[in-house]
Image (spheres, rainbow, N blue to C red):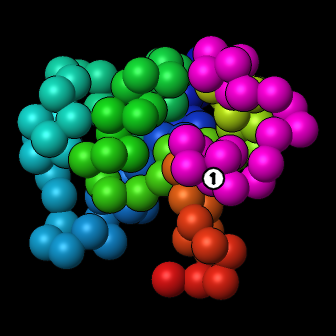
C-alpha cells in the first residue's frame, strides 16, 4: 500500500510554515500552537485530520486566518454559521454587527483592503 499523500490542509500548513519570516520548523510551530510535534507531522503528511480547535491554534501560530488552511470552503461556511448560532445572532442582522464579531476576511473588516 502506498504511503498516504498529504491532504490540502497539511500542504497549506507546510506552505505557510515555509514562507513565514523567519521560517518555522515543525517544532517551532508546535510550540507556538501548543500542540504536539507529532500532531503537526501527521497533519502535514496527511496521516490524520485536524480538529477545529487545532486548526485555529495552528492558524494563530502562523498568523493566518483558519480559512486559508481549509480547502473545503463549505466547511468554513459551516463553522461561521455555527459561530453565529452560538452567539445567537439573527441571520439577517446588520452587517456591522456581524463584522464586529466575525474575523476579518481577505479584504479586512471594512471590505476595502488592508
Give the x, y percent position of residue 12.
50, 53
User: Outermost residue toward the right?
Assistant: 92
Residue 98 higher or lower than 16, as above or below: above
Which residues are the magenta region? 84-102
Q: Which residue is more in the foreground, 1 or 114?
A: 114
Q: Residue at x 57, y 66 (%)?
A: 109
Residue 108 higher or lower than 27, as above or below: below
Where residue 18 sits, quadrant-wise, is bottom left
Relative horizontal placement of residue 61, taking residue 4 as reference (left or right): left
Q: Residue at x 19, y 44 (%)?
A: 29
Label 1 sits on residue? 99
Q: Which residue is more in the foreground, 111 or 21?
A: 111
Relative horizontal placement of residue 58, taking residue 84 as reference (left or right): left
Give the x, y percent position of residue 33.
22, 35
Q: Which residue is more in the foreground, 24 or 84?
A: 84
Residue 30 appearing in the image: yes
Callout 1: SS: helix
Q: How many residues crowd mark 1 within 10 Å: few (<14), some (14–19), many (20+)?
A: some
Q: Residue at x 68, y 56 (%)?
A: 96
Q: Which residue is more in the foreground, 46 or 64?
A: 64
The quadrant of the rendering that contains the N terminus is top right
Give the x, y percent position of residue 44.
41, 38
Residue 52 higher or lower than 40, as above or below: above
Is 13 colored magenta in this rendering? no
Amino acid at each position: 500500500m502506498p504511503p498516504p499523500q498529504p491532504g490540502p490542509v497539511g500542504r497549506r500548513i507546510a506552505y505557510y510554515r515555509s514562507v513565514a519570516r523567519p521560517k518555522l520548523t515543525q517544532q517551532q510551530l508546535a510550540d507556538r500552537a501548543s500542540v504536539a510535534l507529532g500532531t503537526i507531522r501527521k497533519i502535514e503528511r496527511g496521516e490524520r485530520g485536524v480538529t477545529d480547535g487545532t486548526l485555529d491554534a495552528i492558524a494563530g501560530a502562523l498568523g493566518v486566518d483558519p480559512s486559508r488552511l481549509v480547502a473545503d470552503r463549505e466547511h468554513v461556511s459551516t463553522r461561521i454559521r455555527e459561530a453565529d448560532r452560538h452567539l445567537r445572532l439573527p441571520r439577517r442582522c446588520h452587517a456591522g454587527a456581524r463584522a464586529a464579531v466575525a474575523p476579518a476576511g481577505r479584504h479586512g473588516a471594512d471590505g476595502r483592503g488592508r
